[in-house]
């Protein structure tokens, strides 16, 4: 006996509306997108509005933080590069976090935004949180891993990417 299950359309069976399980599967990455988007937007805004963050020296400055982690980082040369222009590095990280967060939250160029988030998290893990022992105490490693599903899957629902893809499909 054969069953007439359709395999296209996210589990839609015979034109029926998807059930709770299929709907949950389709939207599984949405909480991750919201969390990472809001967190990275907040981190970017926090850096941009924090007095003294972009200074080369002083408490709470990016320069002071980089000097503090230089000898314990996995890639001291990356820290040295940041120390050549701490303010420029600080602005690059802050604006990068803001752009990545907005891209993830609104689902615009989601895979590219997620790749940017993964690269920011990787660079921070290899420099700022590398000295954490054991390694999984470093807070940037879980962020790196959290970005990877979005790099692979993008934002298929509740996203500007989905709206634009639907518009392109209808224009054909």
Image: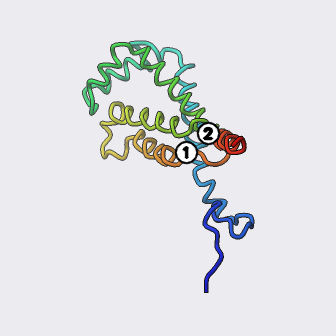
Counting from the top left corner in percent of width and height, residue 86 is at: 39, 15
**Label total for image:** 2
Q: Is residue 119 above or below residue 52?
A: below
Q: Which residue is mark 2?
A: 107
Q: Nearer the viewer, residue 49 or 123?
A: 123
Q: Nearer the viewer, residue 67 or 171?
A: 171
Q: Secondary structure at mark 1?
A: loop
Picture colour scheme: rainbow
Q: Secondary structure at mark 2?
A: loop
How far is mark 1 from mark 2, CA to CA?
8 Å
Counting from the top left corner in percent of width and height, residue 2 is at: 61, 82
The residue that appears at 46% across and 21% down in the rendered structure is: 92
Q: Is residue 94 above or below residue 143?
A: above
Task: Please state, as top left, top right, bottom left or bottom right, where the N terminus lies in the image.
Answer: bottom right
Label 2 neighbour load within 10 Å: few <14, some 14-19, many 20+? many
Q: Are marks 1 and 2 in contact (CB under 8 Å)?
A: yes
């Amino acid at each position: 006996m054969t069953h007439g299950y359709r395999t296209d359309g996210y589990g839609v069976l015979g034109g029926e509306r998807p059930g709770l399980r299929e709907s949950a599967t389709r939207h599984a990455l949405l909480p991750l997108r919201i969390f990472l988007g809001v967190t990275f937007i907040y981190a970017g805004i926090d850096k941009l509005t924090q007095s003294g963050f972009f200074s080369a020296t002083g408490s709470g400055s990016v320069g002071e933080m980089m000097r503090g982690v230089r000898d314990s980082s996995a890639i001291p040369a990356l820290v040295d590069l940041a120390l050549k222009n701490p303010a420029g590095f600080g602005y690059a990280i802050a604006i990068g976090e803001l752009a990545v967060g907005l891209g993830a939250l609104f689902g615009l160029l989601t895979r590219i935004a997620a790749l940017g988030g993964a690269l920011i998290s990787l660079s921070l893990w290899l420099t700022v949180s590398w000295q954490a022992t054991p390694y999984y105490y470093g807070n940037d490693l879980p962020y790196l891993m959290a970005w990877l599903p979005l790099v692979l899957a993008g934002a298929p629902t509740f996203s500007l990417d989905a709206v634009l893809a639907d518009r392109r499909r209808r224009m054909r």
